[in-house]
Image (cartoon, rainbow, N blue to C red):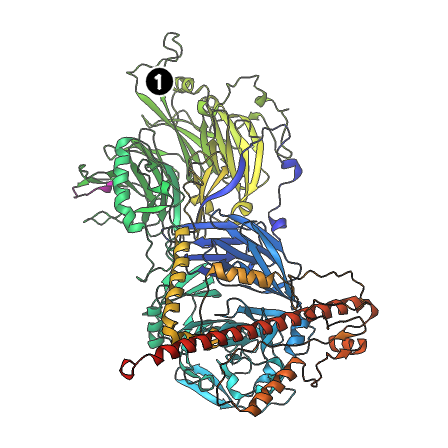
Amino acid sequence: MFAKLFHRAPQESSPRKDAPQLKDFKPHVVVHYGIPSTASILAFDPLQRLLAVGTLDGRIKVIGGDNIECLLLSPTPVPLKYLEFLENQGYLVSVSNENVVQVWDLEQRRLASKLHWESNISAFSVVCGTNYMYVGDEYGYLSVLKFDFEEGNIQHMPYQIPADLIADEAGIPVSDQQSVVGLLAQPCSSGKRVLIAYQIGVIILWDISEDKAILVRGHNDLQLKDEIIIHSTSDIRHDKLNNKSDEEQIEKEISALCWVSSDGSKVAVGYVDGDIILWNLSTTISTNNQKANKSSSNAVKLRLSSGDRRLPVIVLNWSNSPHGGSAGQLFVYGGDDMGSEEVLTILNLDFSSGLEALKCVKRLDLTLNGSYADIELVRAPESSDTTLFVLTNPGQLHVYDDECLTGLISAPDMKNAVNEVQCPVTLPTVEPHMTISKLCLVDSNEGLQRVLKETVLAAKPQSSSPTSTGGAKWPVSGGFPSQLSSDENIGVERIYIAGYQDGYVRIWDATFPVFSHLFVLGLQVEGTEVPGANEPISALDFNSTTSSLAVGNDCGLVHLLKLVGESENLNTHLVTETKHEEINLHHGNGWHSTAVFSLIKSPVRSLRYTFSGARIIVGYEYGKAAVLDAVSSSVLFLIDCTVSNNSPIVSMAIKTYLQTDTDDPEQSGDASSKDPEKEVAFILTKDAHAILVDINSGNKICCQSVNPKESTAISIYLLDEKFAVPELSEHNPMNSPNVPTDGNESVQSGSEPESDTTEDEVNTSSEATELWKNFVDSLVLVCCSNSMLLYSTKSLIQGRSNFIRKIDLEKQCCWATIFKKTELESGVILVYSSGGVEIRSLPDLNLLEETSLMSILRWNFKTNMEKTMSSFGNANISMVYGCEFAVISLFTSENDFRIPEALPRLHDKVVAEAAEAALKFSLSQKNKQIAPTGILGGIIKGIRREKENENTNIEETRDILVPKLEALFSRSPFSVADLDLDLEDDFDAPIKLGSNSGFLTFSPLRVVEKIEVEPISPKPATPSQSQSQTEKNKQMERERLFEGGSVITEPKARTADEIKAKYRKTGTGDTAAVALEAKDKLLERQMKLEKLKENSEELASGSENFADLAGQLAKQMENRKWWQL
């Protein structure tokens, strides 16, 4: 779709081979603010405090604190379906709809690695605190990926299990549609256990280290006596359920799941029919005894409605109660009646008395502002506060903290009184709506920089941390600014000025890629009511020389402001058509309103200061123009520029020159210091008429139609000597109609209709002749929606509208600007309504390069978007698209923003190291607290070691956890990776597996059956154990060792048919596979036997140590008296 809509221009419109090429042409995003309207998924790093927002067009927005934002672009514009951080490691992982796994380097702001998955990825999860990822696909495979930090690539680990092997181990039938729909690493299992949810409704708790299913749960395991239907807080009831028939006990599809306990003992599962089941996974049940352990207490069923047709449960998320215990909040999206209002349901659940005694304390339906996109729950590591992020369409992010949620739950009827916290916006574009903007250079003169630095230093403490609406603390505070941004030797080089629909003007310091808010200017005059002062802003201009700002609005008001220090005292002038009033106001430092002009009741469409800043020209909607004196705050001239239909003034250009007498050879080219500067304005109306006005006298020099066809004019530019325009003559090749063209673009030479003005409307020909002598080397470029025209200034002044070159454009142009790279390189940038961007050379207008907003920013072109586009002549373009603001640069050589030195850092290594150190310290303190002291304490510790390892939730640091997982994932399932096996051996001959297990042999016809050995935790012997119990235990161990076999110690041999029946391997082609699989399983059981032997030796060694300690203790006690005890 994107290829059809935003295809490159036809071949005939591409740059000519003989046209000069721009070597450093590389469009890229320099600054980006705002959440894209296509936002669809959230991720959060709780340690680095970074928020990531994925979109439907392949973009990822990373947001930190202190106005730090970053935009990452995927190579292809496809939706992202999974997004997770490699927590506290500076990397972000995304999975696209094309099943491409991408890892992003946040420190370098680039795509570090990508891996294309062959099948559809249906589940994805990052093992918390590591660089490992679980992947589930449509065929039921469980795979493991690893991002190698040193190599910088994604590696597919050997550990991969198909659905049939998992089904065999779990003892469940294999289905044709065994796709994985959910993967959750079990908390406090160090990533070694993962909960696998299959689409058919079965969940399996799988142990990676033991390669077996610890627990299996499905709908057939339910034996429910009742279900909890939660209509509202006041309407919660328990309905009795009849025993269901076998036909009704069918598996139903799983649509969502989440843990509902911090230790991974309980899980909530949502289904497509709207049911929610809370499963108890606290008891480890072997697969051989699962069916015998069904009970009504293993699950609880919840329903949000009693209707028969309910929405699927799309999202489940859990937040533990800050007070601890078995309670918390379950966040549910879906599960309600079809056609009901779109809400996010919050259930306060309490199962402190057991899961079977579950209580729903309260229910809250949170009405969403827009359609649902995603939610993210975040708990602050330094506190128990929980923050809820809610993402809705289009691109709206809301935040609810504990206080807000508590208020909503306690008083659900007062939802309007408790407002959600909106995401703080560094540069607002929608609320309030931005109507006009301009990116301006700031002069480096000492006086202006001093005033700006003072105001910047005063404003930065207020804007360094954006405050969110509602007064709540914004939880996203990650990243830190570069050291360059705090360099006092670098002043304010650029400012960004924006006008809004509410009548306010906001100004930002745009020197570095991180903008800082400086001023909010209201245009009301203190103590005086100015009609129309709150109307939308329609025009802006800034003069850096005089630090003056001109603002026009839709009511026709023109406000002049000046940035001054405390020592200056300025009055405010109110000027209308009939009166001139002066108001004396007390001002501090900052922006002062020096004058307000209300002359014509027509929207202001264009404002332009002269180079000196002493005068300003105002262009109105109805074709009128005014020349204002900014020094005396007076009106100099009112000029009627209309030719027909009161066409609006859309653009103006000003030329300043020193009047010279070129007829005198002695004075030619030498201006007398006594001659004043002359200024001429070139005014362009929307109907493509150019009017030349002498600003000093207010006289119209000429008025020419610059485009014979009906066309909408866009802008006018003067090209003088700084653009390296060669001297034109009658023999200039550009005047020839036979010059090569760019495909369908026409190069024409001819005459337009004569001047539209009369002798009364223009100046005398002698004055015009005197004027053009000062513009001998100048050209005038007129950009229209369907063409570009290049004129000689001389011909326009003389009333002859002979264009030098004309380019007919194939597409509708909406915005244009000129740029200058070097003394020899300059050009014009065109932006089309289709989103295409072209760069053409000056003055011949040849096509040099082309790109599009879609390829740079994934933007289309919107109506009126050109009003918020601006550039200051160096190919840096600022623009607004919905909620987004961006500055793009078309060339790598134009590095005004000092990239990458001035870029803020997204990953804080100090925070990462501090978090790791804090975890190590916390674990060391915990070990000291739980470690018994003394000799008897050491004995007790040794006795209870195994029990503590099973029941105590002790986290591990990354340097300990990652090597353990590396060893597990680097092997194939059901095999030992560190043994060297010769797979080319003769399978007909018996194979011996080491000296310790030489009695175990197999061949294709006779294979030793697998031996299942369970490591037994050593337990202390007690004198009360009877002999019969000892014999019984030995018998049970023997039966477990030989899987229920007889007391005969020799292994049982099986025939080939028996092996095929057990492993379902049929066909003569699978003989080698059967032998290899049996060989692997045999080796695995051998390792388990060796592990059992090692445990026995450790137990024996522990017994000896116990005996030695007991002997030493007895000797010490013998020499003590009874009063020393």
Percent across and percent down for residue 930 are 38, 72
Crowd band around label 1 with a 10 angstrom C-alpha radius: few (<14), some (14–19), many (20+): some
Q: Residue at x 31, y 39 (%)?
A: 550
Q: Residue at x 46, y 48 (%)?
A: 107
The residue nearer to you, when weighing 430 against 227, is 227
Q: Residue at x 46, y 20 (%)?
A: 777
Assess whether residue 142 is covered by the magenta stretch. Answer: no
Q: Image height check: is 896 above or below 882?
A: above
Q: Image height check: is 394 above or below 299?
A: above
Percent across and percent down for residue 174 are 69, 75
Q: Image height check: is 586 above or below 1046?
A: above
The three-letter amino acid code for the residue at tag 1 is Gln
The residue nearer to you, when weighing 1013 against 643, is 1013
Quarter of the image with the C terminus in it: bottom left
What residue range appears in magenta?
584-593
The residue at the far top in this view is 666
Q: Within the image, what quadrant is residue 549 found in?
A: top left
Name the magenta segment's main secondary structure.
Answer: loop
SS at badge 1: loop
Horizontal side of 704 relative to 113 (left or right) equals: left
Percent across and percent down for residue 921 are 38, 62
Q: Is residue 912 visible?
A: yes
Percent across and percent down for residue 1038 are 64, 83
Q: Within the image, what quadrant is residue 237 found in?
A: bottom left
Q: How many marks?
A: 1
Assess whether residue 589 is covered by the magenta stretch. Answer: yes
Q: Is residue 688 visible?
A: no
Residue for badge 1: 659
